[in-house]
Structure formats: C-alpha cells, structure tokens
Image (cartoon, rainbow, N blue to C red):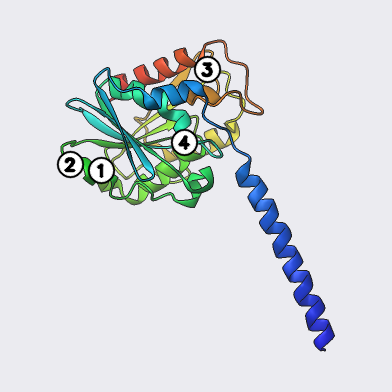
Amino acid sequence: MKKGKKIIASVVLAVLAVLGIGGFVYVSDYYHADDDALKALNLQGDGVQVEQDGAVIWFIPENPAAGIIFYPGGKVEYTAYAPLLRSLAEEGILSALVKMPCNLAVLDADAASGLKDKHSEVASWYMAGHSLGGAMAANHAAKHADWYDGVILLASYSTKDLNDTGLRVLSVYGSEDGVMNRESYEKYRNNLPSDSTEVILPGGNHAQFGSYGPQEGDGRPTISKEEQIRATTEAVINWL
C-alpha cells in the first residue's frame, strides 16, 4: 500500500511539474513592445504628461474631457499600446494603461477598480481594451455599470450582456483582421445595445492597434500602423 501511494504521489508531482513548466513557457512567450512604443512612452511634451503609478501608466492631458481605462490584448506587453493612448491623450482624453499579470487580462479583470478615483476631476469614464483585453474590460464594466459611461472594444466583443446597463458601446476593428473570431463576434453581437456604434477600419488588421509587430494568423494590412492608430483615435473622439 505504501509503495502504491508513493508511486501515485510521484506521478502527481510529475504531472504538476509538466503543467507548471508548460504554463511558464506559455506566459513567457508574448509579444513585446517595439521601439515606437517605447518612444511614445518616454516622450514628454505636446501637452501630455506620462506618469507611472505601480502597474498603471497614465497619459495625462491638460484639462481632460474624459477618461479611458485600457486593458491590453492577450500575451501582449502592455506598453505596446503607448502610441494609441498617447494619441488619445493628445486629443484631451486622460488614459490609463493597465499592466496585467502574465500579460493576460483574464487574470485580473477588475484591475480597473478604484483607478478613476485617482482623477476625480474627470466626470466621464470609459472602459476600453484590445482583443482579450476588450472582452475583460466589458466584463468589468458589466459588473460596475454605474462607474462608467461606456465601453470601447477594439477587435473584440462582449461575452456579457450590456443591454440593460445604460452603457454606450463603440466597436472598432480592421477589415483585414485575421485574428478576431468573426463567428464569436457575430454570436455575441446581441450583447451590445442596439444603438452601439461599429466602425470598420479599411485596411486595418488586428495587431496594429498596438505597436508590437506582426501577430501570428493576422491579415496583411494595407495601411500603416500609424494610420490605424490615427484612424482609431478619430473614431473614438468622434464617438465620444
């Protein structure tokens, strides 16, 4: 009996070790922010102040008109979204870029809790995110609808029903997106209010909402990364 228990224990430990190694390898393989992202992160000026506060990077404009809390895409270094959030801040939107555990927003969907209280001078707040980050941003907003005015989904969809939350919703994706699951996008479309706004960026793809290079399985864009970020900024500003 003792020998049998030892064998079982050894097998269990071996399985746990394999799972642990596999998990470590999985989370260690992620998309890194490129040089353009680092430039946007380190640049001070143009009326935008960049501040690091723990796991959050703030892009603070003068006299912000609204605030956005942004969740990064799955397995993407959060700083890769610095160009987009800086672009929004240059248009007067205070933006919070949230670092996620192991670069997976699903591990901390409520990371936004309390962040808007750090800038009480801003009255209107929106949850936003890219891909998996968008889904988790919608998840958080659905549970705390009285905290926010709306949700911004970039190449994403909401698995939570937002119809009776009072939240406004903007959905933006590129025409050449090869990563976003279109079947799931259509399946969950009814989770969005009927007056939601959808913007399709001609020539845009999945990865160019961030600044981390090509993504496996993605379509080939016919516009530049800078053009996609500029078009996304315009879509958000027009919707706001």
The answer to whether marks 2 and 1 mark residues whose Cβ atoms lie closer than 8 Å is: yes
Q: In this figure, which residue is indicated by the disc labeled 1?
A: 116
**Residue 61 visible in the snapshot:** yes
What's the distance in space between the residues labelled 3 and 2, CA to CA? 35 Å
What's the distance in space between the residues labelled 2 and 1, CA to CA? 7 Å
Q: Quadrant of residue 2?
A: bottom right
The answer to whether marks 1 and 3 mark residues whose Cβ atoms lie closer than 8 Å is: no
Please tell me whether mark 3 sits on a helix, a strand or a loop.
Answer: loop
Say what amino acid the circle numbered 3 marks.
Gly
Please tell me whether mark 2 sits on a helix, a strand or a loop.
Answer: loop
Q: How many marks?
A: 4
- Image coords of residue 20 (percent x, y): 67, 58
Q: In this figure, which residue is indicated by the disc labeled 3?
A: 204
Say what amino acid the circle numbered 4 marks.
Tyr
Q: In this figure, which residue is indicated by the disc labeled 4?
A: 78
What's the distance in space between the residues labelled 2 and 4, CA to CA? 24 Å
Q: Nearer the viewer, mark 4 or mark 3?
A: 4
Q: Of the residues under marks 3 and 2, which one precedes in the sequence?
A: 2
Q: Of the residues under marks 1 and 3, which one precedes in the sequence?
A: 1
Q: Of the residues under marks 4 and 3, which one precedes in the sequence?
A: 4
Residue found 45% across the figure and 12% down from its top:
227
What's the distance in space between the residues labelled 1 and 4, CA to CA? 19 Å
What's the distance in space between the residues labelled 4 and 3, CA to CA? 20 Å
Q: In this figure, which residue is indicated by the disc labeled 2?
A: 120
